[in-house]
Image (spheres, grey):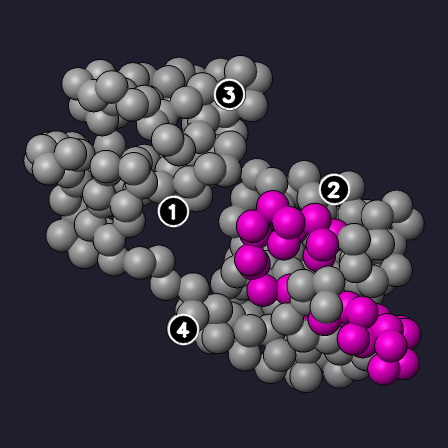
Amino acid sequence: MKLLIVEDEPNLSSIIRKGFSEKNHEVSVALDGTTALDLLSNHNFDVVILDVMLPDINGIEICRRLRAAKNFVPILLLTALGSTENIINGLNSGADDYLLKPFKFLELDARVNALSRRAGQVQKPNEIITIDDLQINSKTKSVSRNGDTIVLTAKEFKLLYYLAINSETILSREQLLDNVWDINFEMNTNVIDVYINYLRKKIDKPYDTKLIHTMKGLGYVLKP
């Protein structure tokens, strides 16, 4: 799994990181809410382990911002505040589970595994995605618009599909590089612009309604 630990106590975050790293998980650490939100906007994680009491943006507010942005990554809250009111507040803000401090690593590990399993079961995109008159079939890897079959390369399809499952959400070049190419390009590469242009020629140019939009200084979005 790819995990994000958001915890401002260096000793505790180090212990958690060591425990999950020894289980061969990929672990990132943020010591404050601002860093956490930046990482979450540019990378995909399987589970977030989130402390409630942080020095800048607290964990409850981070949950709210993520859910408002339609980011449904599983979140496990770590909290020393064990009252029913605090727990309900955390869950209502968008968290999926909580664990009271102090805790044993074995329990944290079990809860993270459970969240990951549940996410794998429920977060399955629809086989057919429809946006305006564009249809994308994730099973057959086929695309059509207004009834016309559109032939895409494997990479063009992967880029279009990622834009489609995040439709109406602005995606930065860094997000597209991370999720479509799966390797680290130089940030000044124009590969995204080149492939967006390829898609526009096939998806947009022959039709009246444009679906792929450039948001200047921000990235790209697929929407009518």
Q: Which mark is residue 121?
A: 4
- Point out the stretch of residues depicted in magenta: 62-91
Q: Which mark is residue 35?
A: 2
* Badge 4 amino acid: Gln
Q: Position of residue 8 (x, y in %)?
A: 85, 55
Q: Position of residue 23 (x, y in %)?
A: 55, 70
At x 15%, y 38%, the residue is 144
Whether residue 68 is visible here, answered yes or no, is yes
Q: Would you name the residue on which mark 1 appears?
A: 165
Q: Could you tell me how far apart the alpha carbons at marks 3 and 2 are, in whole angstroms?
A: 24 Å
Sequence-wise, the earlier of marks 3 and 2 is: 2
Q: Position of residue 36 (x, y in %)?
A: 71, 47
Sequence-wise, the earlier of marks 3 and 1 is: 1
113 w.r.t. 38: above or below: below
Assess disc 4: are there few (<14), some (14-19) or many (≥20) residues with their C-alpha within 10 Å of its C-alpha.
few
* Badge 1 amino acid: Ile
Is 70 part of what is drawn in magenta? yes
Sequence-wise, the earlier of marks 2 and 1 is: 2
* Badge 2 amino acid: Thr
Q: Position of residue 219 (x, y in %)?
A: 50, 24
Q: Could you tell me how far apart the alpha carbons at marks 2 and 4 are, in whole angstroms?
A: 29 Å
Q: Could you tell me how far apart the alpha carbons at marks 3 and 1 are, in whole angstroms?
A: 18 Å
Whether residue 101 is visible here, answered yes or no, is no
